[in-house]
Amino acid sequence: MSSETVMKWIEAGKSIATDPTIKVLCPVCQKTYLQVTDISNENNPSEIERQMLCNKCGAFNALRLTR
Ligand SMILES: [Zn+2]
C-alpha cells in the first residue's frame, strides 16, 4: 500500500468515525463509496469495530471506536 493510500484511509477513517453515513470514496480505487458496517465487540461492549469495505475492489479497513 502506498503512503498516499494510507493517508487516504486515515482521512476516510476520520470522517467515518464522526459520521458513519458519510459518503467517502474508496481510497484504493476511488470508483465507489465505502460501505460502513458496525460490529459490536462481545468481549468489550463499550467498544465497536467500524468496518469500511469497497464493493468494487475489495479494499478493507476497520476502526476501533469507544461508545
Ligand atoms: Zn475500491
Image: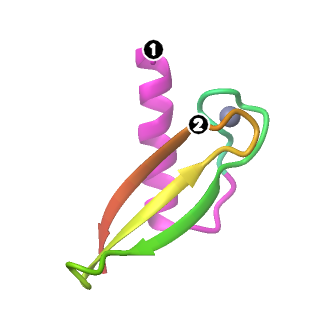
Q: Position of residue 55 (x, y in %)?
A: 73, 45
- Image quadrant occupied by the N terminus: top left
Locate residue 67: give its quadrant.
bottom left
Q: Tell me if mark 1 has few (under 14), some (14-19) or many (20+) residues whose alpha carbon lies within 10 angstroms of its own.
A: few
**Image quadrant, ligand 1:** top right
The residue stretch that appears in magenta: 1-23
- Say if the magenta span includes residue 57: no
Q: Tell me if mark 2 has few (under 14), some (14-19) or many (20+) residues whose alpha carbon lies within 10 angstroms of its own.
A: some
Tally the numbered discs.
2
Q: Position of residue 35 (x, y in %)?
A: 66, 56
Kind of residue at badge 1: Ser
Q: Nearer the viewer, residue 45 or 8?
A: 45
Q: Earlier in the sequence, mark 1 or mark 2?
A: 1
Locate residue 48: give its quadrant.
bottom left
**With respect to residue 48, does 8 lie above or below?**
above
Res. 45 mark: none
